[in-house]
Amino acid sequence: MTKFDITSLLYWITERESIRRLRAEGAPPPWSADHIFQKYSFTNVRREDDRVTRWIATNWREPHATDPDLWFAMAAARFTNWPDTMAELGFPVPCKREHFIATLQDRAARGEKVFNEAYNITNGGQSVPKAQHVANVLDKLWTARNTLRPRPDERLAEWHGRLVQRDGLGSFMAAQIVADMKYVEPLRRANDWMTFAASGPGSKRGLNRVLGRPLQTSWDEHGWRVKLRELHEDIKPKLEGVGLGDLHAQDLQNCLCEFDKYLRAKLGEGHPKTRFTPHASPSFPTV
């Protein structure tokens, strides 16, 4: 098995989880002595602990877990990725294209935030407003819903492969939808629940870092997934040793991406785009 240098990665994981726990317990800031964690925002070790994911799970995913088109709602959720917008939209099944566009345009006209900048959603190179472009993508997904619903006994990798064939759904966004839907039937029983992940530029750099390779060393998807599985096996006992338990591959992939952002700031190679604003009990509206 490949030898990984996971000391810095393990530090990032344990420190980020410590911050989450201290905030949840109501401890006052700062929740870390690390000036990079004090200055910049990083997602949680487990995606399910992130504020936006918690909102989606509480307000849309859990109440509508048996809806066969919940997957479409998860797509709409991740294309906006902002709970205030989602609360105003309402649960988006069935698809209501004009309502979607009007709601997003009204929020923009009022000077209110529409999209979460954590995901880089563009207008697809088209000369149309972003809200209209996203509505067009979602409308096409809804039209194809009978062929896109997740199937019993389907692997996460297989469903991801079907999603990425649709216009406007790249590998990253398809993987976000998979990450939400894996917690409900039928995908919660997928035999690759723990091992599926799709790479991104940040996680490729992060994996290069723990391998001691040049940052821009290229990966093919199969090779990246093989090394991610090896890293998973290597780091699992160490995570269990510090009380963190196990991480599924999508969470580990995300940690590699955030770890890369952290090291870029630490090594003076760049800095994360989102500053950290300390508040102990962040909340969003419910529906």
Image (cartoon, rainbow, N blue to C red):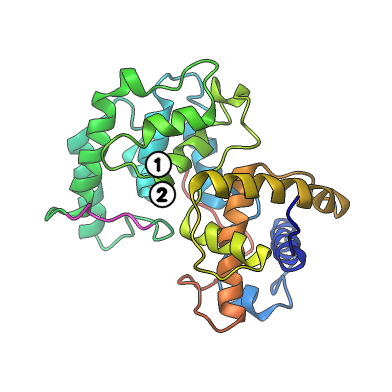
Disc sitting over residue 77 in the figure: 1
Q: Is residue 211 magenta?
A: no
Residue found at the far bottom of this picture: 268
Residues tagged 2 and 1 counted as in contact (Cβ below 8 A): yes
From this viewpoint, is residue 276 visible?
A: yes
Cα distance in 3D space between marks 2 and 1: 5 Å
Which residue is located at x 72 percent, y 73 percent?
32
Secondary structure beneath label 1: helix
Tell me which segment is drawn in magenta. Answer: 120-125
Where's residue 99, x and y in %? 21, 37
Q: Which of 238 and 35 is in front in this view?
A: 238
Q: Is residue 68 left or right of residue 213?
A: left
Which residue is located at x 83 percent, y 53 percent?
238
Disc sitting over residue 81 in the figure: 2
Where's residue 79, x and y in %? 35, 46
Which residue is located at x 52 percent, y 65 percent?
217
> Residue 163, located in which quarter of the rendered image?
top left
The image shows residue 220, relative to residue 11, as above or below, that is above
Could you tell me the amino acid type at mark 1?
Answer: Ala
Where's residue 82, x and y in %? 41, 51
Characterize the magenta stretch by its predominant secondary structure. Answer: loop
Disc sitting over residue 116 in the figure: none
Q: Which of 279 and 124 is in front in this view?
A: 124
State the count of labels: 2
Residue found at the far right of this picture: 241
